[in-house]
Every structure is written in C-alpha cells, then in structure tokens.
Amino acid sequence: MTQDELKDAVAAAAIEEVRPMLGNDIVIGIGTGSTANCFIDRLAALRGDFRGAVASSEASAKRLKDHGIDVFELNEVGTMPVYIDGADEVNAHLHMIKGGGAALTREKIVAACCKTFICIADASKRVERLGNFPLPVEVIPMARSYVARELVKLGADPVYRQGVITDNGNQILDCYEFMIDDPVAMEARINAIAGVVTNGLFAARPADVLLLGSEDGVSRLL
Ligand code: 5RP
C-alpha cells in the first residue's frame, strides 16, 4: 500500500470510531493535514448525521464547507465528544509532535475542548523517541530571535520557516537536532519562554486513541 492508501485506511477506521458518537446536536473537532483531509472527505457521506464541526485551520474549514458540512467557531460550542487529527510523530505514550502544517496552536486549543483525541497516522509516524521530525514552535513575530536564542540554550537548532504565517498571524521556528527524552517537561519548558504561543509537543494532553495504518491493517492503540 502507498502512504496515501494507509492514510485513507486510518481515516476509514476513524469514521467507524466516530459514527456511534454522532447525532443532530453533535459538533466534532477536526484537525489539519493530508490524513485529516482523508477523514474530512469520508465524513462528507455522514453530513446529515451530525450538526457540524470546529476546524483547527482555515484550510480544514474550507474543505469541510466545500463538502457541505457546517463549520462553527469554537466560542459557539461547548465541550465536543471527539477530536480527529494526524501527527508528525507519535510515541508509545501517544505523545505527539504536531504542527508540520503550522496549525499546532489551533489544533491544541480544539483538542483541549474535546473529550477524546483520536490520532490517525500511517506507520511511518510511529517512533520510539520524539524529535527526528523538527519540533515546530509558534512565536509572536517580534519575539522570533529571542525565542530562537532560548531554544539554542535548550539544545535545539531552530530554523525560521520562511514565508509561513500561521492562521493566527504568527511565525514558526522548527527545532532541528532536538531529540526529546521527557516530552511533558519539554512542552512546558518551551511554552514558558516569553513570546512562544505554543509548541508542537502534544504530551500534557496526549491522544487517547491511535489508529495506526500499516501493511498489516489498522491497529487501535490506547
Ligand atoms: C498540521 C499537523 C498535521 O496533523 C501533521 O503535520 C500531519 O500531517 P499529515 O497528515 O499531512 O502527515 O499537525 O499542523
């Protein structure tokens, strides 16, 4: 199977996880990226079975609307039952690195408002130790150089993602050469730097379920 086929297989499995949770008053949280896009495309067939979605990016909001799915502002809805999103890396504790698509901050916010986080990923994303994928950090533009210097002190090699402005009007530093032994502690440590909006470690609030697609099928990991 190709990587795209694996992404679609986990999206199909996620649809079966979500289907029993749907109802006329139900709004669900939806992530960003190519795997989340597979999920959105499959969700279109169920659009009459639920109220709508909150999206973690303008790109996902557009894709949902193009399928005729109602998109709500997060402030319009309360706690949602489920959030579905991909990841750039995920470990055995379901800690993740996210933000390859620069949507990390809205992803973290929407996920925080959902009872269950279902991570959907192909097997290439499963790692023993987080950090081969450069950790994204969203920064207030005026703080970029200061935050970069602080990240160097933590052992990272931060690189400004040129030409990228997040949906929140901010910039991204990607931390290379930065293997992470304690994701919960590092998430808090980076977030404490003045000027950091958030970083792409999703460890304080990991996924609850991982649907991992490989040649052997989709495994469900808790
Ligand atoms: C976007 C993300 C994505 O979930 C992550 O980059 C995975 O993307 P893809 O499904 O395209 O591999 O965090 O900010």
Image (spheres, helix red, strand yellow):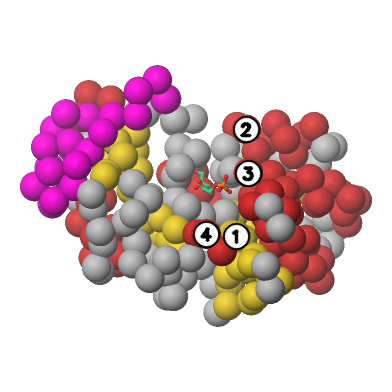
User: Residue 30: percent from the left, percent from the top?
Assistant: 64, 50
Give the CA separation, mark 4 to mark 3: 14 Å
For the question of whether residue 17 can be seen, the reply is yes
Ligand 1: does it lie within 8 Å of the C-beta at label 2? no
**Quadrant of the rendering where the N terminus is positioned:** bottom right
Q: Are marks 1 and 4 in contact (CB under 8 Å)?
A: yes
Task: Give the numbered dot on residue 124.
Answer: 4
Q: Is residue 52 above or below residue 11?
A: above
Q: Nearer the viewer, mark 3 or mark 1?
A: 1
Magenta highlight range: 144-165
Q: CA distance from mark 2 to mark 3?
A: 11 Å
Give the number of marks.
4
For marks 2 and 3, give the one nearer the viewer: 3
Is residue 108 found left or right of 28 in the rendered image? left
Please name the residue that numbered disc 1 is placed on.
122
Quarter where residue 64 is shown: top right
The nearer-to-camera label among 4 and 2 is 4
| Residue nearer the viewer, 81 or 19 | 19
Q: Position of residue 189 (x, y in %)?
A: 20, 56
Of tags 4 and 3, the one toward the viewer is: 4
3D distance between C-alphas at marks 4 and 2: 24 Å
In the image, residue 182 sits, relative to residue 32, either above or below, namely below
Q: Is mark 3 within 8 Å of ligand 1?
A: yes
* Residue 29 seen: no
Up the image or down, 108 lies above or below 119; here it is above
Q: Amino acid at mark 3?
A: Ser
Q: Secondary structure at mark 4?
A: helix
* Disc 1 to disc 4, C-alpha distance: 6 Å
